[in-house]
Image (cartoon, helix red, strand yellow):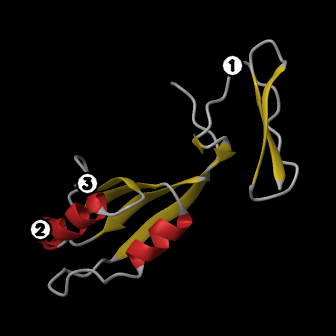
Amino acid sequence: MGILSRWDNSNQQTMETHCHVARDGVKVAPAAKAILFVAVGGCLLVMLIIAGSLILDPDDREPFLAANADVVALARQVSGCLDFVQAADPLDAGRINVFERWDSEEHLFAFRGAGQPASDSPPIRSAEVKRYVISAVEEP
């Protein structure tokens, strides 16, 4: 069990909840403004963001997006997917921007293990896609 604490602007503890977290004794330090956590039942949930870009030959970009449109539609319907986008970059004719939000690693891995890219999908020349583990969300 770890301890998660939420602090308000006056630097006073406003909530302390025992829940399973990545490490024991997790505590959020006081901040200039309140931090909003993605939480269910008082327990911190880690949100995952997958973001980056794929590089293809410019002539292959639209065929790639068309070949993978079903993957985007399927992802948005599966449990745990909060957002899933593969979009043409407006400035680079060979670039596809990737953005995904998942509510858990388990849901992400279950989706990833369910299939491969479309067989008629053009080849990706290079990719720079990273996984970001998000533990807090703030209003902009």
Give the residue displayed 31% in from the left and 83% down from the top: 115
Residue 83: x and y in percent read 35, 51
Mark 1 or 3, nearer chain start: 1
Crowding near the residue tagged with mark 3, few <14, some 14–19, many ≥20 C-alpha atoms within 10 Å: few
Give the residue displayed 19% in from the left and 87% down from the top: 119
Give the residue displayed 42% in from the left and 58% down from the top: 80
Callout 1 amino acid: Lys
Q: Name the residue under label 2.
A: 66
Above or below — where is 120 with respect to 33? below
Give the Cα distance between marks 1 and 2: 43 Å
Q: Closer to us: mark 3 or mark 2?
A: 2
* Residue 11 relative to residue 61: left or right: right
| Quadrant into which the N terminus falls | bottom right
Q: Nearer the viewer, residue 110 or 17?
A: 17
Residue 95: x and y in percent read 28, 60
Q: Which residue lies furthest to the top in this view?
A: 10
Secondary structure of residue under mark 2: helix
Mark 1 or 2, nearer chain start: 1
Give the Cα distance between marks 1 and 3: 38 Å
Give the Cα distance between marks 3 and 2: 18 Å
Crowding near the residue tagged with mark 1, few <14, some 14–19, many ≥20 C-alpha atoms within 10 Å: few
Disc ID at residue 78? none
Disc 3 to disc 2: CB gap under 8 Å:
no
Secondary structure of residue under mark 1: loop
Mark 3 or 2, nearer chain start: 2
Callout 3 amino acid: Asp
Give the residue displayed 14% in from the left and 85% down from the top: 120
Disc ID at residue 33? 1
Above or below — where is 81 with respect to 9? below
Disc ID at residue 92? 3
Above or below — where is 34 with respect to 54? above
